[in-house]
Amino acid sequence: MSTRPNSTMFAALHGELVPHPWRDPAVASSDAYSLFVARSSAMGWLAEAAEGASNGVWGMNDAGQEPGSGSQPSRIAWFQVSLTEPVPAGRPLPVQAFLACAGSVVARIGTPRLQAVQVLLPVQDLDTSAGAYLGGSAVMTLLQDSGWFADSDPRARTRVRVTLDSGQDPSIHSAAPEMLQWIRQFEQDVFSCDSFSLADEDDMDLPPAVIDELCSGPLATRPRFAAPSPSGRLMPWDGCRLSSPTRVPSTESAHR
């Protein structure tokens, strides 16, 4: 297995985690790391830890349940992997698989009540030449996948706030209005974005959980996209639901 520089994906889940009554962490033979390795291997996402191995999507870096230093809400678990290959032209990053695996692991440990998810993505791995990503087949792939949400329970919808942090690169400020219009042009009802704001105001304190070199830090540039109306909500992908139906921010940090 070989990983590449600056190919890190990181996810931290914040909120509350109520342990299962039948699982005693003091004597359990598994933890967040071992469960993530086992789950991602079983699903075919984990690359073999062998020189020259070409299977799988990512190599395991680390995982844990240590609370974040001063984070509010508290961090309940975190996961870090490295992509083994460049993302093919016109394909999205494997974020759904990554977060689905993290959600399965947390659900095995206890019952989560998520209030925020902090994600670091290697956006420099995306091929944006000639619109390969922003206007092309990667989006079509995601739209096709939205069929998973057909005939879903409408009570599962959750209002969210998505924050994009580009670190020291201020270009996202000027791009935010166009991003909102771009999101609205696609006919889908999985996520409806109502507005955006460039104001740096947040009631959650989620300090970066990685070193500045991995996220063009220190993080400073943070436009927010909101879905405040009843029609502007997010349908959860799996059983690891966000806990509040009114205002639940997700923080997504992208490094260059």
Image (cartoon, grey):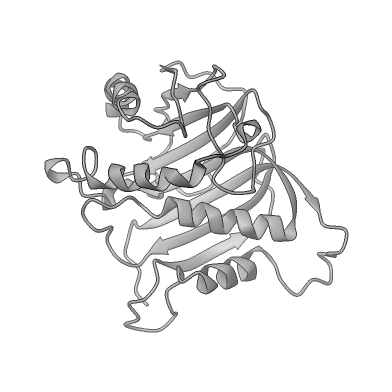
x and y percentages locating residue 214 in the rendered image? 40, 50
Q: Is residue 103 above or below residue 170?
A: below
Which quadrant of the rendered structure holds the N terminus? Answer: bottom left
Q: Identify the residue at horizontal 28%, vertical 52% (top origin).
A: 91
Q: Is residue 212 visible?
A: no
Tell which of 4 and 243 is nearer to you: 243
Asked if residue 12 lies left or right of residue 138, the reply is: right
Q: Is residue 52 above or below residue 138?
A: below
Q: Identify the residue at horizontal 11%, vertical 42% (top origin).
A: 130
Q: Quadrant of residue 38?
A: bottom right
Asked if residue 96 lies left or right of residue 185, the reply is: right
Tell which of 175 and 89 is nearer to you: 89
Q: Is residue 72 visible?
A: yes
Q: Identify the residue at horizontal 55%, vertical 64% (top origin).
A: 62
x and y percentages locating residue 74 in the rendered image? 70, 40
Asked if residue 146 lies left or right of residue 75, the reply is: left
Q: Quadrant of residue 248?
A: top right
